[in-house]
Amino acid sequence: MTLFDFLFLASILLFVICVLLILISAARARFDRVGWWSRLLVSYFAAYALLLLITSLFSPRRVYAPGERRCWDDWCATAVRAVPAEASAIPVCPATPNSRVWLAEIEVSSPAKRVRQRALDARAAIEDQHGSRYSPCAGWLTQGTTPPHTLSDPLGPGESFSVFLPFQLPADRQPVGMVLQHGASPGLLIIGDDSSFLHRRALQPFATLSRN
């Protein structure tokens, strides 16, 4: 945990304490105390929001090393590779002129020792060399005879599996990496977090990128 993680937890505790003191003061008809605690609460969270916005707007974007594993607690994902595929090989993607379908592989893993992991709100997009992002053009794909895995599939301690997704990009664009989101809360409200409000999402470059 970072210093800002502790600050976020302390802010929640402060909010609870202030609300309780406001309710107690109101019940005792101590309206001067109600106003004092209310002003303290509003001032603190106004300062917190300002710091969050300034940090999000002026902090550099985090870019991982190619193929580096990124973890949320014990749920981790790695951008393994992106290779061009013929549109006919992925018939569920709509045929679009002057476009190319890319097949991305994401490895989901867990370093946990005992607890099973699952990310029901995980979403993946890929980013090209100009900073544009693209959502999958179809659902999860299978490789071989095994059923397809999804980002939200559960995995046990120490387990891993690969997820395959197709993306359709303009023919003159190349993917450079993956932008993975693991839900909005509570990272949206944590200062300096990759997923905080208005902060540019972290980029995970692919370990292998075919340019054929």
Image (cartoon, rainbow, N blue to C red):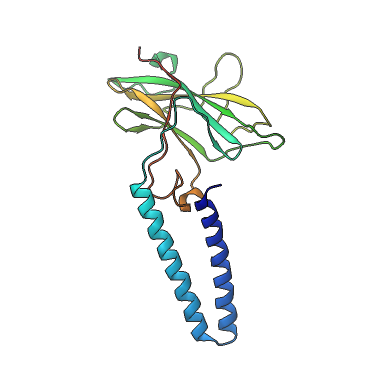
Q: What is the x, y in percent for residue 198?
A: 37, 48
Closest to the observer: 95 or 150? Answer: 150
Quadrant of the image occupied by residue 147: top right
Q: What is the x, y in percent for residue 23?
A: 57, 77
Relative to residue 51, is residue 13 drawn left or right? right
The C terminus lies in quadrant:
top left
Q: Where 92 sits versus 62, above or below?
A: above
Relative to residue 99, is residue 123 drawn left or right? right
Instruction: State the residue at coordinates (45%, 45%).
Output: 195
Closest to the observer: 4 or 19? Answer: 4
Instruction: State the residue at coordinates (68%, 31%).
Output: 157
Q: Is residue 185 visible?
A: no
State the residue lying farthest toward the top. 212
State the residue lying farthest toward the bottom. 29
Quadrant of the image occupied by residue 177: top left
Quadrant of the image occupied by residue 87: top left
Q: What is the x, y in percent for residue 100?
A: 34, 19
